Every structure is written in C-alpha cells, then in structure tokens.
C-alpha cells in the first residue's frame, strides 16, 4: 500500500483534498513546541488553509519535540515529509478528510538542541507557539508564581548547560537575537489556561530572570505574548483510525488525526513582528480574548471534568455515552447554567444558551469516540484551572457550588483506585503520589483531601465548600454516582438543553 509522503501526493489527489500550494516554496515563519493531535487539528490546519489560498508563503511551521516521547512523532513526520491526514467526523455520520501540509520541518531537541536554537534565532522565525499542556508552564496554581519543579527545567537553570526544555531553548534563542540586534519573535500560547499569554509571559520571564536578569528585562519589555482561546475536540489517534484511513483512501498514514468539525480560534491581535492574515481563514482577531476564554474554560473544559469522574464511576468510558445519558446530560447542563455561567462576563456575539446546547451536541458525537480517560490525564493541573475558579467565584457571590463539590468528591472516589463495578481506575497524573496520600488522609478524616494546597489552595479552609464536599462524598459512598447525581438534578432536569 502507498505510504503518505510528498511523492505520493499526485496519486492521492483524486481520493481526497491535498495541498494546492508548492510546499518546497513555503518558508518557515512559525516554530511550534508540542506537536500533538490538537495542534495538527487546529493551528496547523488553519495555516494549511491559509497556504491553500495562495497568499503569503512565509508561514510554514517547524515543529519541535522536547520530550523523549516526541521521538515517535519526529520519526513519523520525517518519514511522511510532514504530511498527515485530518479526518473530521460529524454527528450525522458525515466525514471529510484532507491531507495537511503546513508542517514543513520537525526538529527533535534531544538529538540536536543547537539546531532548535538556530531555528528559533533565525530572523525568519516571527512566531513561537506552544501547546505544552496546562502543567507545562511551571506555574503554581495556589500562588500564581513560577515554581520550577520538573527535571528538565531544573536542569536548564544550572549554569553552562545545554538547554532541553521549551523555556530553556526559547530563552537561549532570545539571548542570541538580543546579542545580534534581531527583533524578538512573538510567543503565542495555545494551551487551555486562563490568560494563557500572560501565563507564558510570567513563566518565560521568570525562567530568564533566574538565568540572566538583564535578558529577562529585555524579554519583558520587547516580547509580545498574545492571549488566545482555542477549541476543537480532538481525541487520541487509535489503530482503528489508521486502519479506517487506509481502507477509505487507499494509503498508509502512520499518525492521522480525527476531530470534530467544530473549530474556533479567538486570538488577541498583538504581533509586533508580523503575523499571517488569519482572519482570512476564520480566526477571530480581537482586542480582548478574556470573555471568550472564560466562556470556553468554564463551560467546555470544566464540563469535561464534571462529566468524567461521575460518568466513569457509573461505568461509562466515552464522552458521548455520558452526554447521551439524560441524567448525566442534565447534570452537566445544570452545572453550566447554575454554577459556571453566572461567573462569566458578557461574550460579544455569543448567545450563551445556544453555546451550552451546542456543547452538549458536540459532546454527544459518537463518531469522534472521545474517551473520558483522555480528559482525566493530569487532573491535578486541569481541575484548578477549569473548575476551581468557578467554585471560588460562586463562593464570593454566595452562589451554588453543589455540583462542583460532587465532581470533586467523584474525583476523590476515582482516586481510591476502583470504579463502582470494582474495575481498577487508570490514573495518570504527575502528582499521583501526593494525591494518593491525600486520599488516605481523606478516608481517615473526610474533607482532608481539600487540604492539598498545591491543588485546592485555601478551599480546604472554606467551611461552606468543605461541608458541600463532605455531603457529596458521603452520598457517593452510600449510594453511588447515579443516585448522587439524581439527588441534585431530579427536580428540574433541563431536557430542552439535551436534545
């Protein structure tokens, strides 16, 4: 069977859409750290769409991997000349596929960090983008301050070391640009973090200050960090996805991407070194991202957490299973309506009722087959960023926190190690040791879980929330997830919102 690569494209153009531009003429203008499924379904797709319009060819993407696990992506993209298949699957069973060609280079930093620094220092590089996960910025959730703990960051803070982390490599390149009088690039975070540009600024400037205070001042004064909101549900690629691409289109793609048709990118227009005309391909360029960002984080991302632990305990394993279950769908909508939405600012051009309904519709897509397990990875990083801001604001307002408290209790129950059927729970979290210790304390003294300050901050001292958590915990252990959810939703399950 034909393998996907540049030479194979002429053979494939009758089977699906392929790049209409000459890829050898595309110049790299963007360097991206964290080339995973989401980057390839979102930012790289938008750039590919732009290149297909036939305009500027200065915005090709050079992907960079810094983790040992990125070696596989390096091998696949190198063998496929940066090409991959993006398959969009609708709720009605429709499917649209195209070959994406905007990633024109890929560098694996562990093999050659100097090559990454050269690429970053090249004057042609005008944007450095990041999708390094919520925990990749070394910001302590309880203090909001830079807190370097990972081995790669600690390694890079030692004098005279060859950098290996994203921030170490970026700082080294900015030092070279400063020395040469080269204009700095813009740093663009594409991670699901409130004020993601502001967080990236704090992380990079704080890191640089520990290396070179003068350089840190220059970065703070000259480098732009636009905020953004990004959205497209993109599950982990499976062997079944690879087989489906081969069967449908007659070629082998070692790492296709499957995603939902919905797409959204709201981006602060702050690019002093220049940017591609993204507004031409559907990106919303705005002066203030925050209303859109909070809407997405507190409705979509928080709902992912709200559904996952309760749904998993009850025996569900896929997002669409939970969201087509009227009981759980009503609970999710209730959280969005009663707890999350009152904490939001007005969002220009958005009907929040329609947005919430659309979310349930998107979550219910059986073709995407998004797993609850994907949403639960590193929950100790996600929950403080998505759910706990809602809790804190509602406590300030005197509003309801019962659904969020039940979600936190379900997370604690999940961390005990088995679901309600006695099946072992699959827990992936960088704080797993701390979490297990906190759960043991909680079993001895209900409510002690909330004293894990790196996750919950001072919420363990809030009597109202601690009481709500204890009641939710007792309900889960007494009668299980479905009964606990029913207790909160039975009076008014909003069936209009789950159609």
Image: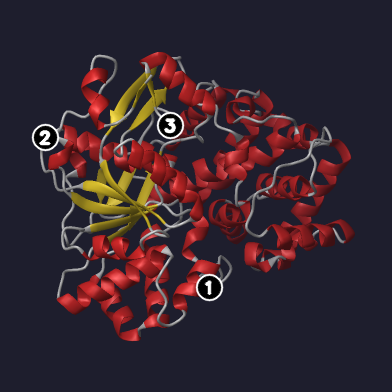
* Mark 1: few/some/many CA within 10 Å (<14, 14-19, 20+): some
Residue 314 in percent (x, y) is at 75, 32
Horizontally, residue 275 falls left or right of residue 328, namely left
Residue 468 in percent (x, y) is at 75, 52
**Residue beneath label 2, please?**
54
Q: Residue 272, located in which quarter of the rendered image?
A: bottom left
Front in this rendered view, residue 112 or 208: 112
Front in this rendered view, residue 215 or 478: 215
Horizontally, residue 339 falls left or right of residue 2, namely right
Horizontally, residue 231 falls left or right of residue 490, namely left
Q: Residue at x 33, y 35 (%)?
A: 80
Label 1: which secondary element: loop
* Mark 2: few/some/many CA within 10 Å (<14, 14-19, 20+): few
Q: Quadrant of the N terminus?
A: top left
Q: Quadrant of the C terminus?
A: top right
**Residue beneath label 3, please?**
254
Front in this rendered view, residue 285 or 241: 241
Q: Residue at x 58, y 51 (%)?
A: 387
Badge 3 or badge 1: first in the primary sequence: 1
> How far apart in space, not on screen, are marks 2 and 3 (Cα)?
28 Å
């Amino acid at each position: 069977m034909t393998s996907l690569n540049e030479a194979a494209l002429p053979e494939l153009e009758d089977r699906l859409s392929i790049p209409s531009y000459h890829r050898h003429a595309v110049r790299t203008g963007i360097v991206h750290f964290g080339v995973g499924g989401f980057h390839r379904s979102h930012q790289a797709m938008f750039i590919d769409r732009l290149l297909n319009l036939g305009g500027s060819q200065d915005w090709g993407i050079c992907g960079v991997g810094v983790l040992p696990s990125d070696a596989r992506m390096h091998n696949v993209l190198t063998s496929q000349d940066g090409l991959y298949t993006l398959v969009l699957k609708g709720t009605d069973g429709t499917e649209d596929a195209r070959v994406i060609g905007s990633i024109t280079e890929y560098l694996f930093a562990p093999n050659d960090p100097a090559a990454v620094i050269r690429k970053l220092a090249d004057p042609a590089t005008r944007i450095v983008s990041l999708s390094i996960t919520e925990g990749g910025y070394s910001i302590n959730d309880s203090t909001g301050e830079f807190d370097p703990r990972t081995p790669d960051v600690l390694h890079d803070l030692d004098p005279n070391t060859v950098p290996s982390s994203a921030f170490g490599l970026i700082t080294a390149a900015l030092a070279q640009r400063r020395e040469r009088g080269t204009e700095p690039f813009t740093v663009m975070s594409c991670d699901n973090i409130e004020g993601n540009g502001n967080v990236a600024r704090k992380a990079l400037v704080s890191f640089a200050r520990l290396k070179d205070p003068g350089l840190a001042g220059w970065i703070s004064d000259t480098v732009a960090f636009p905020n953004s909101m990004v959205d497209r549900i993109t599950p982990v690629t499976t062997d079944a996805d690879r087989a489906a691409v081969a069967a449908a289109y007659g070629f082998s793609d070692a790492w296709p991407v499957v995603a939902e048709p919905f797409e959204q990118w709201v981006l602060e227009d702050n690019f002093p070194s220049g940017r591609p005309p993204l507004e031409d391909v559907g990106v919303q360029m705005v002066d203030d991202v925050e209303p859109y960002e909070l809407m997405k984080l507190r409705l979509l991302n928080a709902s992912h957490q709200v559904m996952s632990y309760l749904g998993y305990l009850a025996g569900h394993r896929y997002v669409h299973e939970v969201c087509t279950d009227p009981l759980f769908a009503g609970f999710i909508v209730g959280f969005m309506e009663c707890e999350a939405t009152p904490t939001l600012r007005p969002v220009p051009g958005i009907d929040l009722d329609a947005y919430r309904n659309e979310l349930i519709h998107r979550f219910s897509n059986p073709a995407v087959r998004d797993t609850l397990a994907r949403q639960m990875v590193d929950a100790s990083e996600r929950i403080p960023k998505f759910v706990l801001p809602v809790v804190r604001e509602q406590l300030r307002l005197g509003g309801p926190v019962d659904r969020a408290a039940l979600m936190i209790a379900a997370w604690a129950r999940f961390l005990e190690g088995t679901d309600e059927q006695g099946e072992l729970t699959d827990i992936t979290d960088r704080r797993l040791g701390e979490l297990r210790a906190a759960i043991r304390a909680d079993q001895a003294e209900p409510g002690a879980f909330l004293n894990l300050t790196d996750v919950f901050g001072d919420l363990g001292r809030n009597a109202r929330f601690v009481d709500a958590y204890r009641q939710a915990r007792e309900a889960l252990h007494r009668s299980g997830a479905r009964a606990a959810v029913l207790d909160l939703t039975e009076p008014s399950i909003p069936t209009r919102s789950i159609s």
